[in-house]
Image (spheres, rainbow, N blue to C red):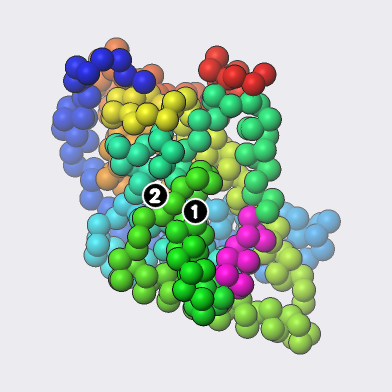
């Protein structure tokens, strides 16, 4: 990554001055955006359950996946919002979406923060990083196929491992370290949780187990059609597949395992200007992932305006400009043909 030990100008101070009025989260944007996305997603899900899958049901399935995907990605905002910035938002997100889809916010909060630590980003301790540009192309293909198993793993995590770990302390330790995080790095080990964090994880586990235990019991007794959990699995797999593609377009993944300074992190991250289509696969501000790593405390609704201001104000040689791509295909093409790839 960066050569030598001399400090490099980061431009962070100048950037913060340009966007200094954009750091306050606006509840009038957060609440309607999340609630409308979730309402559309769950309504379309009911349509996918009731309508023929080879007809309008497939359209409802796609709409449900995209809408719930947008609603789900507010989990990313939860990890960066300051306490009490949006009273009730975390509870509402978990009740409406996190618990029903078996992805409570406790799987992400505290884990995603490690991805932003300057001492961890790009290293083996980063939960959301793999040096994909240095591996084989088969590794990229395998990475895209991983979401196929994710719905099954979520069931196992919450309906089998959770209750067993409540009874067996050694298993509990393993579950908290290795199975309580949404990660792409299988080597990641979550740091020890505080007593408060352990209580939060336990409460979410109980809620997930109770809800889905009741749903599966209803299916077993014939009170609910099997199509409901199967449709959920299809929607979840589609959501996770889109998110996996988005993840590929978030970074260049050229890290060699060493920590990166803020400039190297920016150059290893991506901003996609794109079009309306970009908002479908990278909603809630995640199209500006490079900017997010540069200024992680900017709320999602400010990122587009912040990007516009920075592109107008920064000098032509600014590192920030080198993080910008016109679209997803250019990012994926660069990753696929990376000169760092060792297994062709």
> In front here: 161 or 184?
161
Q: Is residue 151 magenta?
A: yes
Up/down of 324 relative to 59, above or below: above
Determine crowd level at label 1: few under 14, some 14-19, many 20+ residues with C-alpha closer than 10 A. Answer: some
Magenta segment's dominant SS is helix
**Residue 73 drawn at (x, y percent):** 47, 52
What is the quadrant of residue 78 in the picture?
bottom left
The kind of secondary structure element at disc 2 is helix
Which residue is under mark 1?
A: 182
Badge 1 vs badge 2, beta-carbon distance below 8 Å: yes
Image disc number at residue 112 = 2
Determine crowd level at label 2: few under 14, some 14-19, many 20+ residues with C-alpha closer than 10 A. Answer: some
Quarter occupied by the C terminus: top right
What is the quadrant of residue 57 in the picture?
bottom right
**Residue 253 drawn at (x, y percent):** 48, 29
**Residue at 27% over, 53% down:** 25
Up/down of 325 relative to 236, above or below: above
Up/down of 27 relative to 92, above or below: above
Q: Which range of residues does the magenta coloring cover?
A: 150-161
- Mark 1 and mark 2 lie on one chain; the one further toward the N terminus is 2
């Amino acid at each position: 990554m960066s050569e030598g030990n001399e400090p490099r100008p980061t431009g962070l101070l100048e950037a913060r001055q340009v966007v200094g009025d954009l750091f306050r989260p606006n509840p009038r944007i957060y609440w309607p955006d999340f609630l409308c996305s979730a309402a559309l997603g769950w309504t379309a899900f009911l349509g996918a359950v009731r309508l023929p899958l080879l007809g309008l049901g497939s359209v409802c399935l796609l709409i449900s996946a995209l809408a719930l995907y947008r609603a789900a990605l507010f989990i990313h905002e939860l990890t960066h919002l300051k306490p009490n910035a949006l009273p009730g938002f975390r509870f509402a997100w978990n009740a409406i979406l996190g618990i029903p889809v078996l992805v409570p916010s406790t799987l992400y909060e505290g884990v995603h923060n490690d991805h932003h630590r300057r001492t961890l980003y790009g290293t083996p301790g980063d939960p959301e990083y793999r040096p994909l540009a240095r591996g084989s192309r088969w590794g990229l293909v395998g990475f895209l196929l991983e979401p196929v198993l994710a719905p099954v793993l979520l069931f196992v995590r919450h309906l089998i491992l959770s209750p067993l770990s409540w009874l067996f302390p050694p298993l509990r330790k393993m579950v908290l370290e290795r199975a309580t995080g949404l990660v792409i790095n299988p080597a990641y080990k979550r740091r020890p949780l505080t007593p408060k964090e352990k209580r939060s994880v336990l409460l979410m586990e109980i809620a997930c187990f109770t809800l889905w235990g009741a749903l599966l019991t209803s299916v077993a007794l014939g009170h609910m059609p099997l199509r409901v959990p199967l449709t959920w699995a299809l929607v979840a797999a589609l959501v996770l597949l889109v998110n996996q593609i988005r993840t590929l377009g978030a970074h260049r993944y050229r890290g060699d395992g060493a920590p990166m300074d803020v400039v190297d992190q920016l150059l290893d991250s991506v901003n996609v200007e794109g079009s309306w289509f970009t908002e479908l696969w990278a909603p809630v501000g995640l199209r500006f992932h490079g900017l997010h790593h540069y200024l992680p405390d900017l709320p999602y609704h400010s990122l587009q305006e912040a990007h516009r201001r920075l592109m107008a104000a920064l000098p032509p040689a600014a590192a920030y400009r080198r993080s910008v791509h016109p679209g997803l295909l250019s990012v994926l093409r660069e990753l696929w043909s990376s000169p760092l790839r060792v297994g062709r």
